[in-house]
Amino acid sequence: MRCQLCGEVAVISMPQHRLKLCEEHFPAWVERRVARTIESFRMFSPDDRLLVAVSGGKDSLALWEILLRLGYQADGVYIHLGIDHEGYSDRSQSYAEAYAETHPEATLHVVNVRERYGRSVPELALEGGRKTCSRCGMIKRYLMNRMAREGDYAAIVTGHNLDDEAAQLLQNNLYWLRGYLQRQAPVLPQTHPGLARKAKPLCLVAERESAAYTLVRGIEYIQQECPHSVGATSIFHKHILNDLERRSPGTKLQFYQGFIRAREDGFLAGTDETPPLEECAQCGQPTSANALCAFCRMLETEEP
Ligand code: AMP
Ligand code: ZN
Ligand code: ZN
């Protein structure tokens, strides 16, 4: 297998792009693709300060690397969720820290949920009788937004890749979750002074491509999946999409890009179900709830 640009040994074949590339041309191709994604969706501008949500996994570390290589000023935030099974949170943190140590131009902020709020995410979920993953999502979104606003960052960027987005889209379509469809976008602008702009620059990069990118660039990441994600519907949906992709390369990209184009053409106009936002009486963060936001309600009603 040979690189189509230089004839050297290819490290990856991407049937959906009809492209095989070597260890030099492949990472450069990924970086260009991300740069074009950022520009075409007007995610942010070259002098914006960015906050990368870093989980210690391959996607967010690849994203951090790409943004720094593209010349962005990008700091990171790691949220320690207190998931102790096989040292998951501690180990994830050490991968994020190891990366940051070799990149002195960037700062890694760490938020430790247990140290700050007295209980871990699984404990908070258990107390509230909620599913760990949904609680975890709410807590991460809250803390990411808060860190971005407090640090005066122009945007929070996450490592969601094409596989994540396509699986989310499938889920949203299966159940016709209109509000979620409306809010599923490569970039969400700041709709309230207290709400940070959010962007997903890897949304057109497949999981397999981001894994290959970290390998070629020599980035070490946590390979262990979150113990709570075992059996998650999203993983099942990713398998289904991979089956489709094997049969017809390009399906995933077509599914997601077609949706984004339709969305931009106003296909979802009039389905916006987001209620007006007010400020939480406790923490001041924007919320659609009366008085307290979901995060403060959780802390208030679920005392240790
Ligand atoms: P996931 O929902 O685990 O697939 O993660 C999606 C994205 O959310 C990742 O690519 C990261 O950008 C971000 N993220 C997930 N977990 C964390 C964490 N513990 N700390 C900071 N960012 C995270
Ligand atoms: Zn080449
Ligand atoms: Zn609040």
Image (cartoon, rainbow, N blue to C red):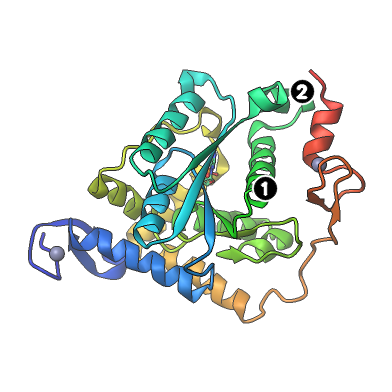
**Residue 206 lies in quadrant:** bottom left
Q: Residue furthest bottom?
A: 265
Give the image quadrant in which the ligand numbered 3 is located: top right
Residue bearing the label numbered 2: 127
Residue 131 horizontal side relative to residue 95, left or right = right
Residue at the image position 50 percent from the left and 32 percent from the top:
226
Packing grade of label 1 (10 A; few <14, some 14-19, many >=20) is: few
Asked if residue 22 is positioned above or below residue 148 in the image, the reply reads: below
Residue bearing the label numbered 1: 150
What is the spatial separation of the Cα atoms under label 1 and label 2, in whole angstroms? 28 Å
Residue 27 horizontal side relative to residue 166, left or right = left
Q: Residue furthest front?
A: 105
**Residue 250 lies in quadrant:** bottom left
Q: How many marks?
A: 2
Please indicate, yes or no, whether residue 161 appears anywhere in the rendered image: no
**Residue type for callout 1:** Glu
Of the numbered discs 1 and 2, the one sitting upstream in the chain is: 2
**Secondary structure of the residue carrying numbered label 2:** helix
Residue at the image position 82 percent from the left and 44 percent from the top:
293
Residue 157: x and y in percent read: 53, 55
Residue at the image position 7 percent from the left and 66 percent from the top:
7
**Secondary structure of the residue carrying numbered label 1:** helix
**Residue type for callout 2:** Glu
Residue at the image position 76 percent from the left and 62 percent from the top:
192
Residue 248 horizontal side relative to residue 55, left or right = left
Residue 35: x and y in percent read: 40, 68
Please indicate, yes or no, whether residue 95 appears anywhere in the rendered image: yes
Q: Which disc number belongs to residue 18? A: none
Please state, as top left, top right, bottom left or bottom right, where the N terminus lies in the image: bottom left
